[in-house]
Image (tube, rainbow, N blue to C red):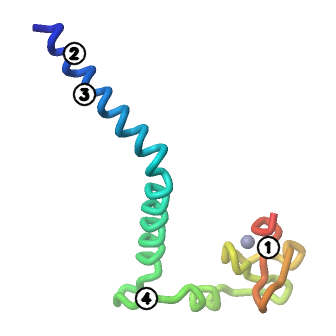
Amino acid sequence: MATDYDEVRSDVKETQDRSLEALQSANAPDARSVVNELDEADAFDEGLTPGGEIVSEELIVQVIPQAADEFTCYSCFLVRHRSQLARESNGHSYCIECEG
Ligand SMILES: [Zn+2]
């Protein structure tokens, strides 16, 4: 019967809505940390050489050609012009975009 079928489907949908709500409220931080872990895993993959060796971020930064009037932001790792330097701390430079 069509009516019974609809009732079953609405029950299923309600259950899905409830679990989605639980996911979005109580488990939201967990879901976010999972996403962060995935991002880090991606970054790891990009740091792998064809030989399978892991290239450290520091090594990648040093390879970037850098002019005398430029610096590499320690937060976003982009090469910036000196005019965009917002802060220097412990020998590390930070650009105005990262410092807000
Ligand atoms: Zn930056």
First reached walking from the N terminus: tag 1 or tag 3: 3
* Label 4 vs label 2, nearer the camera: 2
- In front: 27, or 88? 27
First reached walking from the N terminus: tag 4 or tag 2: 2
Which residue bears the numbered disc 3?
12
Any mark on residue 73, and which? none
Q: CA distance from mark 4 to mark 2?
A: 55 Å
Q: Quadrant of residue 45?
A: bottom left
Q: CA distance from mark 3 to mark 2?
A: 9 Å
Q: CA distance from mark 4 to mark 3?
A: 46 Å
Q: CA distance from mark 2 to mark 1?
A: 58 Å
Any mark on residue 95, and which? 1
Which quadrant: the C terminus?
bottom right
First reached walking from the N terminus: tag 4 or tag 1: 4
Whether the residues at callouts 2 and 1 have beta carbons within 8 Å, the answer is no
Q: Is residue 14 left or right of residue 89?
A: left
